[in-house]
Image (cartoon, helix red, strand yellow):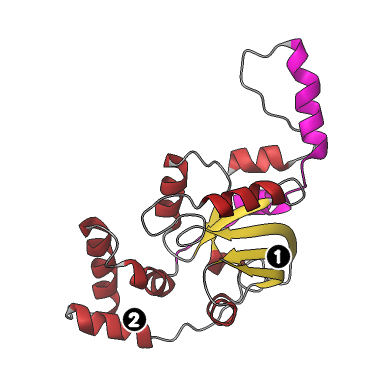
Amino acid sequence: KRYHAAVARPNVVYGQLPLRASDIPGLIAQANTRPPDPLAVDLVYAEVESNALSILKHNLPYLEAKDEAFRAEWLSLAKSMFGNLLLDELTKSVQQADLTPKPGIFAGRFYEDVCVDVEGTLVDKNGKLQPEVVNLVIQLAETYPITLWTGGNVANAERQIRELGISRKITAKQLMRGATVSMVIDDMPQAEFDSEYGVLYTHYKRI
């Protein structure tokens, strides 16, 4: 978060050492044309707490496709909330649980960001990048700051995208409740996204 906040500022550039004098003009041009990214700065000051119920709901469709470790983590979290029930009972409890909307700490703010979902959107259920989404994000990044986000476990999603060579900033959808962004790119139906996360946007693109 500190790195993304630093390079989000218009007077900061990043170059890998050793730098040659001929590298400097290109770095300065890059800094001057980069979209401003105040959300990257704001995230440094945010105390992010995972919403356990939201994570359980988000990860429920992926239980069969993921490995044993993923399922064990889901079961452990579900049992901590609903008790030592059978899988079918836990699944039903999670499905029926009500997510009470609560304003996020950024509620009422507008960010120019294009916010891209990770699981099922940028990355398919087999853990592979979806080229058409990657290409779209690359195009949009010329004009807008890009934020990756997830309704699940942020640490797990961050580890996944780093292993795939992606270094964009990432946050929780729940944290952005009540804020407005330029665009949302997601695999969820638009009405379902609106109901579950309460993030406002100018454009919504479903993948």
Which residue in the protein does label 1 denote?
Answer: 181
Q: Residue 12, located in which quarter of the rendered image?
A: top right
Is 43 covered by the magenta stretch?
yes
Residue pushed farthest front? 132
Circle 2: element type: helix
Q: Residue 13, located in which quarter of the rendered image?
A: top right
- Residue 202 makes an appearance in the image: yes
Q: Is residue 87 above or below residue 169?
A: below
Which residue in the protein does label 2 denote?
Answer: 94
In this view, the residue in front, 54 or 65, is 65
Magenta span = 21-50
In this view, the residue in front, 126 or 99, is 126
At x 65%, y 46%, the residue is 138
In this view, the residue in front, 60 or 132, is 132
Question: Callout 1, which amino acid?
Answer: Val
* Whole-percent x, y for residue 43 in the image: 61, 53
Distance CA(mark 1)–CA(mark 2) = 29 Å
Taking the image as shown, residue 135 lies to the left or right of residue 166, namely right
Question: Callout 2, which amino acid?
Answer: Val
